[in-house]
């Protein structure tokens, strides 16, 4: 039995007890019995609202903590340009060393390394580009591609 089912059963028992008390006490106590029952219903509603508010606050805190913890994408043109230039400048000697020591397989391995480093840079500056979660800039919600 879930928590909601247990609360529903408890509320039904309270209603049955109120109706039984009305039968035993008579109509002159209707007002007091109804007020007592409505107070219990009101307490139950307050508890449900409080739980919902706490859950939403916890979710918002988790989102804020996740955003604070995640690295910020610095997607400036200068950084991309500089990284591209450094990557190309280093590609020449790495290709020469790879091809000189292991011929074609060495060249292929060196270029896989260069492409891998560039892919990591793109993934860092564009989170979610490779099928991860992206943040909707309009609503702030996450969605999966």
Image (spheres, helix red, strand yellow):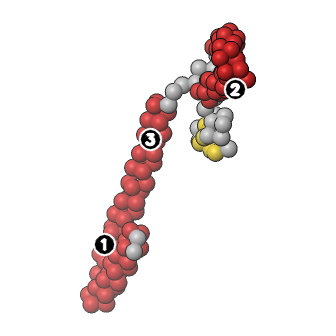
Q: Residue at x 43, y 40 (%)?
A: 61
Element at badge 2?
helix
Q: CA distance from mark 2 to mark 1?
A: 84 Å
Sooner in the amino-acid sequence: mark 3 or mark 1: 1
Choose mark 3 or mark 1, whichever is in front: 3
Q: Position of residue 144 (x, y in %)?
A: 64, 45
Numbered badge on residue 36: 1
Which label sits in the foreground, 3 or 2? Answer: 2
Where 52 falls versus 6 (above or below)? Answer: above
Res. 87 image quadrant: top right
Earlier in the chain: of badge 2 and badge 1, it is 1
Q: Is residue 30 visible?
A: no
Q: Secondary structure at mark 3?
A: helix
Q: Residue at position x 33%, y 69% from top?
A: 40
Q: Is residue 90 above or below residue 3?
A: above
Q: Nearer the viewer, mark 2 or mark 1?
A: 2
Question: What residue would you read off at disc 3?
Answer: 62
Q: Tell me which residue sits at (39%, 74%) in the image.
A: 1
Distance in Å between CA atoms under marks 3 and 1: 39 Å
Residue that sits furthest to the left in the current view: 25
Residue 127: where, in percent of width, then height? 61, 32
Which of the two residues, 53 or 34, is positioned nearer the viewer here?
A: 53
Per the rendering, the mark at residue 8 is none
Q: Residues within 10 Å of mark 1 (few under 14, many from 20)?
A: some
Q: Earlier in the sequence, mark 3 or mark 2?
A: 3
Mark 3 Cα within 10 Å, few/some/many (few <14, many 20+)? few
Residue highlighted by disc 2: 105
Residue 13: where, in percent of width, then height? 34, 80
Q: Give the SS element for disc 1.
A: helix
Location of the C terminus (image quadrant):
top right
């Amino acid at each position: 039995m879930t928590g909601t089912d247990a609360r529903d059963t408890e509320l039904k028992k309270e209603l049955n007890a109120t109706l039984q008390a009305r039968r035993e006490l008579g109509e002159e106590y209707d007002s007091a019995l109804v007020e007592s029952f409505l107070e219990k219903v009101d307490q139950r509603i307050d508890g449900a609202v409080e739980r919902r508010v706490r859950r939403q606050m916890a979710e918002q805190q988790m989102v804020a903590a996740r955003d604070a913890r995640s690295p910020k994408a610095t997607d400036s043109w200068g950084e991309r340009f500089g990284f591209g230039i450094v990557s190309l400048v280093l590609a020449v000697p790495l290709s020469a060393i790879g091809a000189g020591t292991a011929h074609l397989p060495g060249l292929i391995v060196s270029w896989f390394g260069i492409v891998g480093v560039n892919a990591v840079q793109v993934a860092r500056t564009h989170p979610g580009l490779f099928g991860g979660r992206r943040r909707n800039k309009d609503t702030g919600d996450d969605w999966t591609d």
